[in-house]
Image (spheres, grey):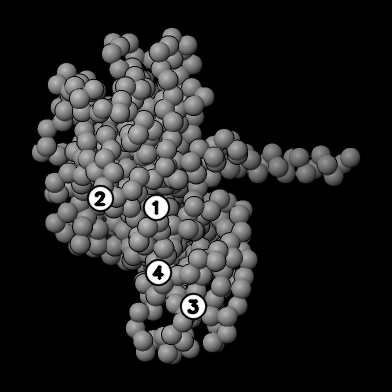
Amino acid sequence: MALFRSLGRASRAAAARLSKNSVRSCSSQAPPRILGSRRFCDALGRPSGSRHSCRHFCSAVPPIFLEDLDVERRDPQGGLDAALNSVVKIFTVSSSPNYVLPWQKKPLRELTGSGFAIADRRILTNAHVVADHSYVMVRKHGSAVKFRAKVQAVGHECDLALLRVDDDDFWEGIEPLELGDIPFLQDSVATVGYPQGGDNICVTRGVVSRVEPVQYIHGGSHLIAIQIDAAVNPGNSGGPAMYNNTVVGVVFQNLSNAENVGYIIPVPVIKHFLSDVEERGRYIGFCGLGLVCQSTENKQLRDHLKMDSKKTGVLVSKVYPLTEVSNYIKKDDVLLAFDGVLIANDGSVTFRNRERISFVHLVTMKREGESAALRVLRDGKEINFNVKLAPVKPLVPNHQFERLPSYYIFAGLVFVPLTLPYLHEYGDDWYNASPRRLCDRTFSKMPKKPGEQFVIMSQVLIDDINAGYERLAELQVKQVNGEKIVNLQHLRRLVEGCKEPYIRFDLDDGRVIVLKYESAKEASLRILQNHRISSAVSTDLLEADKEEESSDDAEKEVGTL
């Protein structure tokens, strides 16, 4: 089993066990966190997590630098001239949130990556190159001047980002690169970028090895990608892969502990990202069905499901609530076709010439709001449905870039919503090092109510008022004074609106915390001062209060007209 590692700053893996290979993203930076992948049946909108893990990797194959490259001899078709002039080096200063101490941020750090110019004076690069950025600069090939760049849009699931440079001097002599199509197997491609090992531009070559959905380590999604055998190293992230004078992909991660196994983001994913930004003004995301499916390769299973020899499909083993498809599809239905494309018993569909690919690819290429035709088998009868698709949000978010963590502190009890970045604070082997119960629920739970969160008590800031409760950290908070909580904001309002002399928190596993309410309120300020914490409430919760107040005021004004 291969382990995928992102070469980006905030990559992750949900690895139950480590194997010999791993995939990582290709920006030159500190080792990332890990996220794994599941089979096709778990990739339809649910968070990924399995026995795969990812880390940074530096290929042992030396890069080819421009000074040693005869472009005309190595590329007789002249496909690299434009790329060399259009590829830029990106310098990013970033600061990640601290999920252990959510009222703080981690120290600033610098990293570099690659990018290239596309139409409308934009620069395309990887999301992990600019994630949690504080300042971004770019430098053209052959220039010593760095220009200030602004991040226009970021799609963390697809690991893509758009930058803009307002200075006209930067765009002199730069021609935008054109997007091509998915190359065929054994087509030769050239990757261009600024990998570690030097400061100048670098070109490596390889051939297309396979095309299939893989784990995008940075964002935790399962999207189509192209595997190539070119040397892809940290710093290559965001650079173009060229074929016949066009861009056929964006370099973003590689397979560690393997010789020259790199991955590029193909053009269909790029166009999906760009169309979101161009048509809707922001990145929306990739759709999911909200189903967990099982293969039907066993004949006895097919007989039980009343599938004759001419029918193929996958068994629906779980349907997530709060999705459009939950209004139509039921557990134990057999999904036979998606948009008229027949699904095989192993979950694959036809793709190009004698190639097959997971039907998940058909789902993810849909835009939000588009309809899909589903054909299912239920109790031996075929039924057709048309459903509108949308991105599926998990109960435990895969990532939370460009925002600070939510938290609420009362009497030294620190409450936070569970996220994968929180679990990543346990280190590279977080899947085994973090609390098992939290990990299991991270990958098995989906929200049943809008706005629902998995709230935990992350730690106890020790004080006389809470002494004896410090061992109850890292447990889910289920109720406050007998009322089930929906999210962190709901918990906060229940605490602050308490009218009882005692306040009771019911935790997972039947554990209970009881405090004298007025004494706990008095102790809260003292604890914050002792730990140098400026606020007991995170900024996002306070801003939500202001938005609700503004909305209430607007409703009152309308009522008086």
The amino acid sitting under disc 1 is Leu
Look at discs 2 and 4 and give the one toward the viewer.
2
The residues bearing labels 3 and 4 have C-alpha atoms spaced at a distance of 11 Å
Is 217 rendered above or below residue 46?
A: above
The residue tagged 4 is: 347
The residue tagged 2 is: 209
The amino acid sitting under disc 2 is Ser
Dot 1 crowding, Cα within 10 Å, few <14, some 14–19, many 20+: many
Label 2 element class: strand
Q: Which one is earlier in the sequence, the residue at label 2 or at label 4? A: 2
Q: Which one is earlier in the sequence, the residue at label 4 or at label 1? A: 1
The residues bearing labels 3 and 2 have C-alpha atoms spaced at a distance of 33 Å
The residues bearing labels 4 and 1 have C-alpha atoms spaced at a distance of 15 Å
Dot 3 crowding, Cα within 10 Å, few <14, some 14–19, many 20+: many
Q: Which one is earlier in the sequence, the residue at label 2 or at label 1? A: 2
Quadrant, the N terminus: bottom left
x and y, in percent, of residue 442 in the image: 37, 61
The residue tagged 3 is: 334
Q: Contact (CB < 8 A) between labels 3 and 4?
A: no
Q: Which one is earlier in the sequence, the residue at label 3 or at label 4? A: 3
Residue toward you, 415 or 341: 341
Residue at 47%, 11% in the rendered image: 168
Is 319 rendered above or below residue 515?
A: below
The residue tagged 1 is: 223
